[in-house]
Image: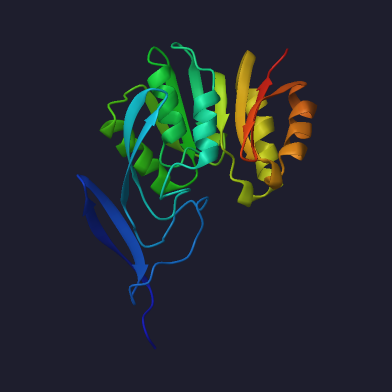
Amino acid sequence: MTDKSNFVSLLYFKGLFFYIKSNREGRALTDHYYSAKPTATHELNELQATLRGKDFTFITDAGVFSKKAIDFGSQLLIQSMDIARDHRVLDVGCGYGPIGLSAASLADLGTVTMLDINERAIQLSQDNANRNGLANVNIIQSDLLDKVKGQYFDRILTNPPIRAGKDIVHRIFAEAYSALVSRGQLWIVIQKKQGAPSAFTKLQEIFGDVQEVTKDKGYRIFKATKID
């Protein structure tokens, strides 16, 4: 019988080390970007982007969301989000970090906590924070908001994992409400065809005060404010 157990090798790319998990035949195991332990074969890539007036360099990889370019929805959220210099910010589902690190550059007197269930995304976000000189970040592997229970934030940002299902997206909404300070805001990007109208209705049920800030190319930016 052929041994098809997994093995780990090491890859070096642009100053970073990455572990590769594959089977004995050299094929990566299949998964999705909200897997806790992605096993897709590494495809490291470097992106350059200017976000809110700051130039960024990002290293991306297979097994994380939108590896080839910063997706339009995230860009629209970054352009729209209202972040003060001293805000405490939470990025839920941070991926390789464009939203959270953009927030960190704006909240230079505050802190940004970045969460993702995907361990590869967490490593990339930490490496990208270092690469872009951003030290006011705390990057944690977490199932949604589990690892920040008892902490409170002025802003929560998310480009939610729609493919994980409506229940997960609605759980983000509910947990975000509990984690916001009074008058704190959840900012979310979602496509109309992927459930923006039902998401808006659910946000109204939880928050009451919900606004559509902008829309473009089928994407909607919603702002939900916690009113005690």
What sort of colour scheme is used for the picture? rainbow
Does 122 appear above or below 53?
below
Residue 157 seen by the camera = yes
Q: Is residue 168 above or below residue 137?
A: below
Q: Residue at x 54, y 32 (%)?
A: 76
Residue ID at (46%, 32%): 99
Asked which quadrant contains residue 9, the reply is bottom left
In the rendered structure, the answer to whether residue 225 lies left or right of residue 58 reads right
Residue 216: image location, x then y, percent: 61, 35
Quarter of the image for residue 155 reads top right
Q: Is residue 92 visible?
A: no
> Residue lying farthest bottom?
1
- Looking at the picture, tell me which residue is in the foreground, 69 or 117: 69
Residue at 32 percent across and 29 percent down: it is 55
The C terminus lies in quadrant: top right
Q: Position of residue 153 (x, y in %)?
A: 55, 19
Image spot of residue 58 (x, y percent) = 33, 40
Q: Position of residue 72 (x, y in %)?
A: 52, 40
Compare residues 32 and 149 and report the one nearer the observer. Answer: 32
Q: Could you tell me which quadrant the N terminus lies in? A: bottom left
Q: Give me the residue at 36% from left, 62% from top.
A: 41
